[in-house]
Image (spheres, grey):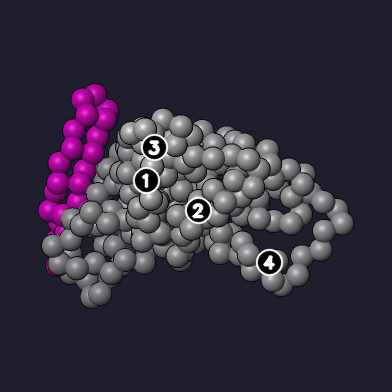
Amino acid sequence: MKINIKRYTNETTPKEEFLDYEVNLERPTLLEVLYEIKINQDATLTYSSGCRSSVCGSCAMRVNGREVLACAYKVQDGDRVEHLGNVEVIRDLVVNMDKALEFNAKSKAWLSQKNPNAKLSIADEKINEIQSDCILCGSCYSVCPVYSVNDAFKGPFALTRVWKYVSDKRELDAQVKIATIQSDGIWDCTLCNECTVVCPQGISSKADIEKLRMRSASFGYSDPNFANMDFGGGLSF
């Protein structure tokens, strides 16, 4: 089968080009194909990998314009492979996720003030169980239309992690976390749901952001965009 890979170098002058490779493997994953190419055809091909079990997130990339994990994706003849979008490319399929990861800290996405008397029931654990499955692969940032035009937007996985801790009954400082996501945060999201579609763990950051908006309203916050809207002298019903 043939596969088309976008190569990128930034050593002196940035250069991008798609190169064709042909491999003879039976029903391989994309990661297996990349290993085959690097070992037997082109040692300069650069990519990231780790667990090979879809739990570390390091091999996230795009195939035919859609974000996938290379260790899980089954290659089809003619696939076009390229690095994630909306992030700095280091080389070929390797990107720098530092900026996106910094949003976890800026959003205070951790359990900061724990209530020592809080007891979690099974139902309590289910409230934010799926959010704990986030592997920080960056697929949601790659596909996010807001982040593509505003790199200060805190983005999908950071906001999902805020919901994880805001919804935890052990957290005593939920209001402070809510305050951190008012600017370049929950109100900037377009709720397009693209992040949910590409998440390999099935996490819906859109749904988490909607819940964060409701929690924000309970603390007296509202969408600041409403203040800038012109309703033409009033509304008629």
Asked if residue 60 can be seen in this view, the reply is no
Image quadrant in which you'd find residue 22: bottom left
Of the two numbered discs 1 and 2 in the rendering, the one whose residue sits closer to the viewer:
1
Give the prevailing secondary structure in the magenta stretch: strand
Q: Secondary structure at mark 3?
A: loop
Binning the other alpha carbons within 10 Å of mark 1 as few (below 14), some (14 to 19) or many (20 upward) gives: few
Question: How far apart are the alpha carbons under marks 1 and 2?
Answer: 27 Å
Binning the other alpha carbons within 10 Å of mark 4 as few (below 14), some (14 to 19) or many (20 upward) gives: few
The x and y percentages for residue 134 are 52, 57
Say which mark, if any, is on residue 234. 3
Give the residue number, with chain letter if any, for mark 2.
210
Give the residue number, with chain letter if any, for mark 1.
236
Q: Secondary structure at mark 2?
A: helix
**122 magenta-colored:** no
Q: In the visual, does 100 lie left or right of 132?
A: left
* Amino acid type for the residue under numbered disc 1: Ser
- Residue found 14% across the figure and 48% down from its top: 19
Answer above or below: position of 228 versus 163.
above
**7 magenta-colored:** yes
Binning the other alpha carbons within 10 Å of mark 2 as few (below 14), some (14 to 19) or many (20 upward) gives: some
